[in-house]
Amino acid sequence: MTEMANASALLSGRDDPYHLEDLRRYVVEDSVDDIIKTFLIIMYSAISVVGIFGNLLTILSILLNKKLRSIPNVYICNLAFADLIVCAVISTFSAYLLTVDPLRVSAIMCQFIGALTTALLGKTLLGLTAIAVNRYILLVKGSQLYTRVYTRRSVIVSVIMLWTMAAVLISPALLGFGQYGYNTKMGTCIFLAHDRMTYIFVQAILHGMIVGPCIIVTLYCYIRIIIYFRQTQHRLKMSRKNPKAIIPSPNASSKTNSSNGSHSSSEYTATTDNSTKVEDYELSSTGPSNNNSSGSPGHQQYHAAKRNRASRRVVANLCTVFIVFLLCWSPIVGIFTIDYYNKYPAAVYHIFFCIAVCNSCMNVFIYAGMNRAFRRTYTQLLTFQCHRINSAF
């Protein structure tokens, strides 16, 4: 009887949320085959090893390489830190639960892991949205607004706010609106399965107030950035065809255009240079630019096109991180949303949750594959050439 009472407490953190016969039924119904357990243990173990190593590599790259210490990379480093916790704690603990009787695990520990998992999910999504907004303001709104919004102090405050919002996100379930504990469907400690109040908490708070708005804002930012790049490309083509024509920048003010009737294409290239000069190294797919808007129109157009391509690579990198996040987390979010009556087999939940956790070890490969600066710094760290990290690119 004591063991079943502990099991009941583990599942919910409360004394008697389920009748004992219901508890036994849930544990039996949601069990998975040993083959699936073995596969998941291997996967979680690999995620832990690769994720811890990869995210530490990303954090060290940003901290050690002076040219990578830019404002966007503050958010990248923050994202890597959250992923590091997921791989070190969540993935490792999930593998451990598959090797023991989960009902013997401490209820307090399981509730803590459940709250931490939820907080890190919210923090990651909020961080991806912050990155998208950062790129949107720089590229679409222009450097003047960017330099006012993104000061050293404001960036630090924004990072603190992201973690604070993640902490606030998990508070309703800690106060009784929903419950954290061992989820028999997913085979890990997160929010409960088979509990209507927890289902409402997830849909109303997590999905309705965090996941949905963040995805909408992030998609809006990247769509506007894509439109900006298309306009930029069009203006560059017009500038090459008619170098002396008035070709306003996509984010140039109408006041500037109307007050200077003798502008040439340098107006556009100067503005493009100004918007990228704020973050010369950006993420950094190219070296810092030492070009200005002086020189012949052809020279200006060449460097404007080069900077535009560099910005597009940076945005493509960050957008890929966001898309991969959606692809990894959408299956488990989707099945939990539509499976109100718990009709889908637990094995599907187990696998989908493993895929979601796998996202936390993937970003290092995205940065290495799409960003030359990160790739070079990774190589120097792995080959113990730390003294060459800050050499000229």
Image: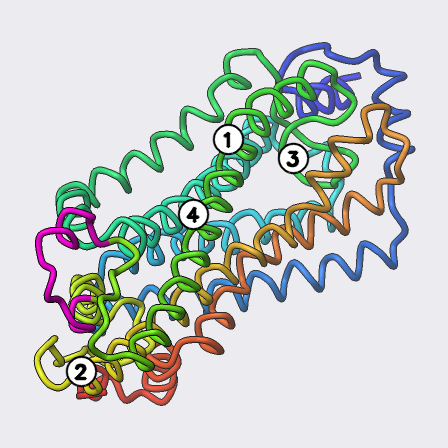
Query: In the image, residue 363 lies at what x, y percent?
Result: 49, 64
Residue pointed to by mark 1: 210
Residue pointed to by mark 4: 221
Question: Which numbered mark, 3 or 4, is in the foreground of this view?
Answer: 4
| Most foreground residue, 268 or 342 | 268
Q: Is residue 122 above or below residue 41?
A: above
Q: Residues within 10 Å of mark 4 (few under 14, many from 20)?
A: many
Q: Residue at x 61, y 19 (%)?
A: 201
| 259 to the left or right of 223 | left
Earlier along the polypeptide chain: callout 3 or callout 1?
A: 3
Name the amino acid, label 3: Val
Name the amino acid, label 1: Ile
| 133 to the left or right of 157 | right
Name the amino acid, label 2: Pro
Quadrant in which the C terminus appears = bottom left
Separation of disc 3 and disc 4 at Cα? 43 Å
| 150 to the left or right of 20 | left
Q: Residues within 10 Å of mark 2 (few under 14, many from 20)?
A: some
Separation of disc 2 and disc 1 at Cα? 47 Å
